[in-house]
Image (tube, helix red, strand yellow):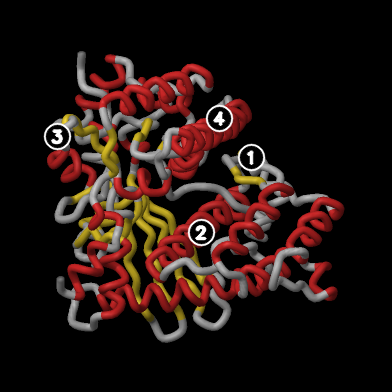
Amino acid sequence: MSDDSQAYAGTAEGQGPVEIDAELARHLQNKREELFEEFEIRDAFPPEVLSEARARTEGVDEEIEEELEHRQDLRDLTTWTTDPIDAQDFDDALSIRENEETYTLWVHIADVTHYVHPESEMWAEAVKRGNTVYMPAYTIHMLPPVLAETVCSLVPNEDRLAHTVEMEIKKDTLSFESIDIYKSVIHSDERLTYTQCENRLDDPELPLHEENSLVFDLADQLHEQRKEDGSLVLNPSRDRAHTIIEECMLKANKAVTHELMWNRGVEAMYRVHPQPTPDQWDKALREITELNGVSIQSTSWDEPRKAVNDALESANSRTLNKIQRAVLKVMPRAKYMNDPFGGHYALNFDIYGHFTSPIRRLSDLINHWIVHENDVPEDLVELCDRASDRQKDAETAERLYKQFLEEVGLDPYAVNNRGIVTVDEDGDVIDENGLPPKE
């Protein structure tokens, strides 16, 4: 076996899907349906929602051509997406340019509200769902895939409608020189997986090497600055591809909410994360210092986020998980509010909100509408509560489903990364999605 073949065999996609028999497939389906009922998770879409979604996929090219009259034409700008290998829709794309004293970073987000608006059936359904629910190898979408995975998805080699956040970022301070948010038409040059992104960074001969290297340089600086400022970084060993996406999306979200709060003074769906009490932090830090090989300097106890970051940097994988659990146990739940008061404690941002995932989060969908309309829905407070509650329910259902997978002898991580198939006694595939065969 060649080195390349060995390397591929060690990846999730190289190992192939997890195989189960028909009886276990039925057990998994029954468990999912039980959780859907308990947490009021809507799996199938009503016919009127699907009908509306299908109708909005017709005449797309002509519609985009007409939209060019009202939008910035960015189709000549080098643009690409980076997502997990199993991503079903692509709602964010990047472009970058280096100037003498600044970087220009474009974060292009799928313009979902062009298709899904408060008068539509899809909007009403999205409010009921609140977000996309990701169970291992089973996804319950917020928006019908027939729309989300086609005209809303920033697929390569196709013109697409986008909501672009253009940021001029100073090289010396990494602060905003300017922020411009506008409707655009983009044309993605390529769809990269995280693994492909890493390869592009390593090989100067490959397309998009220069662009990915430049955006990683910026993202790495943003990441280090966040840590220095006191942002909690629970996963310190994140690879370069994830760092690029995480930091660029954080910067874009920050830019949008900065614009809404300070320049427009409008309400929005802000993400507020309260801080633990001093006693809660004290409990967490004591638990962490009792772990083997972990020490926190007494001077760091006044800055617990930085103390945790330091502990995580030097921890092995087993200790890392224990530190993460100790912190998460005392962390209050973040929630959506129409006022950013209190800020986002874990990120150490005074103002923060979500904008970059309108295909899978209600909060982002609503913030897109607010940015474009410069107005807020009358029921914004109720929508904030709805989004917070649905997210909590989704996370609980996902956790319980993962526990069930472990109980029946399956590794949730493997199922999540490799997918699942149902096979018969001879090992032949019955269903590629792991669903039980039809009776």
Q: CA distance from mark 2 to mark 4?
A: 24 Å
Badge 3 density bin: few <14, some 14–19, many ≥20, Cα 10 Å: few
Residue type of the residue flagged with mark 1: Lys
Lower position in the chain sequence, tag 2 or tag 4 = 2
Answer with left or right where residue 65 lies relative to residue 119.
left
Q: CA distance from mark 4 to mark 1?
A: 13 Å
Q: Quadrant of the N terminus?
A: bottom left
Q: Considering only vertical position in the picture, is 293 above or below 345? A: below
Contact (Cβ within 8 Å) of mark 2 with mark 1 = no
Lower position in the chain sequence, tag 2 or tag 3 = 2
Secondary structure state at the residue bearing disc 4: helix
Q: In front: 334, or 316? A: 316
- Please give the residue where the numbered disc 1 appears in the rendered image: 335
Give coordinates of residue 262: x percent, y percent.
Answer: 62, 54
Answer with left or right where residue 223 lies relative to residue 196.
right
Residue type of the residue flagged with mark 3: Asp
- Please give the residue where the numbered disc 3 appears in the rendered image: 426
Secondary structure state at the residue bearing disc 2: helix
Lower position in the chain sequence, tag 4 or tag 1 = 1
Q: CA distance from mark 4 to mark 3?
A: 39 Å
Badge 2 density bin: few <14, some 14–19, many ≥20, Cα 10 Å: some
Give coordinates of residue 431: x percent, y percent.
Answer: 19, 31
- Please give the residue where the numbered disc 2 appears in the rendered image: 250
Lower position in the chain sequence, tag 3 or tag 1 = 1
Lower position in the chain sequence, tag 4 or tag 3 = 4
- Please give the residue where the numbered disc 4 appears in the rendered image: 393
Q: Quadrant of residue 121?
A: top left
